[in-house]
Amino acid sequence: MAQLIDGRKWAAVSRAETAQSVAMLVQKGITPGLAVILVGDNPASESYVRGKEKAAREVGITSQLIRLPVETTETELLHWIDLLNRDPLCHGILVQLPLPDHIAAERVIEAISPAKDVDGFHTQNIGALSVGLPAIVPCTPLGVMKLLAYESVPIAGAHAVIIGRSNIVGKPMASLLLAQSATVTICHSKTHDLASITRQADILVAAVGRPKMVTGDMIKPGAVVIDVGINRTDEGLVGDVDFASASTVAAAITPVPRGVGPMTIAMLLHNTVTAALRT
């Protein structure tokens, strides 16, 4: 059976490291501040925001929640972002997605100052990451990299296969792995004979949003499997990987839940401190 990569355990380690960094900043007169904007009353978004607020407070980050009604216009939302961009006490801005249909998420993300873009979604941050310049990195792929580091998984020279090419996970994941000298293959919906490629992976990252798509026979014996997928099904939350069959083949694997998810929030806190350090 594969070794379980416990995201909750490593997220706690990361949060403790962040708390130490916050304490050092506070001694210098800087208290990292995070502003979260929530538009509407999506129950899942409410839950995520509460978790982020609680985690921020626990490490000493000042958290400000701005609740806006669902009928808020794009212009009004952009005004709030402008105010936060100019607020010296706010180091990180997060607009909880998804937004109501009448608001263009792309315009909202681009309105956030790249220096305060703790989600790492701004094109300036994504572009800097792709060419190896300092950037605020999207939280989920950064969390995966932290997990691999904590677990001492060799990356240089390894063949890493990523299933999924989103701007939020797949593409930045590839940039981060390349930066550590992995050989990277990105697979997607148009990839021919997916299984023949995934069976070559020393590190397999599944981030496609299809429940249990990756089965044990698609995995190289001894591979490290990172399941980024979170899919709500009749049996509860499941990942993109069929855990039961994959765990009999892989050397190590993340579960869903309690795998990558906790690291995503931990990296939001990390990014807020990174932003504060750069002020």
Image: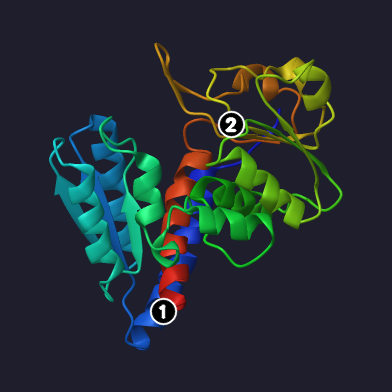
Name the spot of residue 49 as percent of width and height, x first.
Answer: 28, 45
Q: CA distance from mark 1 to mark 2?
A: 33 Å
27 or 40: which is nearer to us? Answer: 40
**Relative to residue 268, is residue 21 depicted above or below?**
below
**Relative to residue 119, is residue 235 depicted above or below?**
above
Q: Is residue 137 visible?
A: no
10 Å neighbourhood of mark 2: few (<14), some, or many (≥20)?
many
Q: Quadrant of the N terminus?
A: top right
Identify residue type, mark 1: Thr
Name the spot of residue 230 as percent of width and height, x first.
Answer: 47, 28
Q: Secondary structure at mark 1?
A: loop
Q: Is residue 249 left or right of residue 214?
A: right
Q: Quadrant of the C terminus?
A: bottom left
Residue at 63% x, 51% y: name it: 145
Disc sitting over residue 279 in the figure: 1
Q: Which residue is mark 2?
A: 207
Q: Is residue 128 left or right of residue 33?
A: right
Q: Is residue 196 left or right of residue 206?
A: right
Identify residue type, mark 2: Ala
Q: Is residue 56 visible?
A: yes
Residue at 25% x, 46% y: name it: 50
Tell me which label, 1 or 2, sits earlier in the chain: 2
Residue at 47% x, 32% y: name it: 257
Disc sitting over residue 73 in the figure: none
Name the mark nearer the viewer: 1 or 2: 1
